[in-house]
Amino acid sequence: MEGISAAASVIGVIQLTGSIVTICSSYLREVKSAQDDIITLQRTVAGLEGTVQRLREFLQGPHGTGLITSSLLVDNITDCLSALGALEKRIDPGKRQGMMKRLGLRAFKWPLKRKEVDKSIQDLESYKSSFILALQIDQTYIS
């Protein structure tokens, strides 16, 4: 059951990473003052997405049920999903942009401070590292 839960959560992480990369792209076009932060965050999220894609393939593959270490990642995957959800909510311009248009404001501002970007990147890199380590351990086990 944990493997199914992990695979479902992994799909949620993949969807959120794709959404965040898209949101960052819209900021890149509109906000010039925070481009370095946006690009760094976008690359970090895209890197996490690639790792989680690999984790999903591994969990759903022929050896998926025997992957002891990767199946224990359910809590990490759930925490990562929560962190990505909070990040998406924080940077999603959808509601703010509608309100700004109603007020006649056209400015599009990056909502995160440098420290917040650094903290998000640090957290996401930590999740990515734990996923990579689990994949390496399970690949070694299978070989």
Image (spheres, helix red, strand yellow):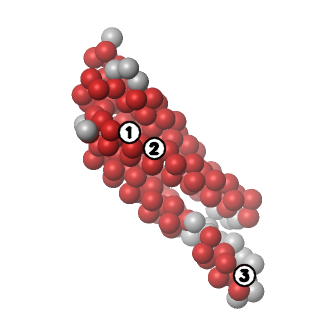
First reached walking from the N terminus: tag 2 or tag 3:
2
Quarter of the view holding residue 68? top left
- Number of other residues with Cα within 10 Å of mark 3, as a class: few under 14, some 14 to 19, many 20 or more: few
Residue annotated with mark 3 = 101
Label 3, secondary structure: give it.
helix
- Number of other residues with Cα within 10 Å of mark 2, as a class: few under 14, some 14 to 19, many 20 or more: some
Label 3 to label 1, Cα distance in Å?
A: 40 Å
Image quarter of the N terminus? top left
Q: Nearer the viewer, mark 3 or mark 1?
A: 1
Describe residue 76's horizontal placement relative to residue 29 as left or right.
left
Residue annotated with mark 2 = 11
The label number, if any, that marks residue 7 in the structure image: 1
User: What residue is at 75 percent from the left and 86 percent from the top?
Assistant: 104
Label 2, secondary structure: give it.
helix
Label 2 to label 1, Cα distance in Å?
A: 6 Å
Percent of width and height locating residue 136: 35, 24
Percent of width and height locating residue 84: 45, 55
Q: Nearer the viewer, mark 2 or mark 3?
A: 2
Image quarter of the C terminus? top left
Percent of width and height locating residue 140: 31, 16
Label 1, secondary structure: give it.
helix
Label 2 to label 3, Cα distance in Å?
A: 34 Å
User: Which residue is the extreme one toward the bottom?
Assistant: 103
Q: Are marks 2 and 1 in contact (CB under 8 Å)?
A: yes
93 lies above or below 119? below
First reached walking from the N terminus: tag 3 or tag 1:
1
Q: Amino acid at mark 3?
A: Lys
**Looking at the image, which is closer to me, 15 or 138?**
15
- Observer able to see residue 36: no
User: What residue is at 62 percent from the left and 58 percent from the top?
Assistant: 23
Q: Amino acid at mark 2?
A: Ile
Percent of width and height locating residue 37: 59, 56
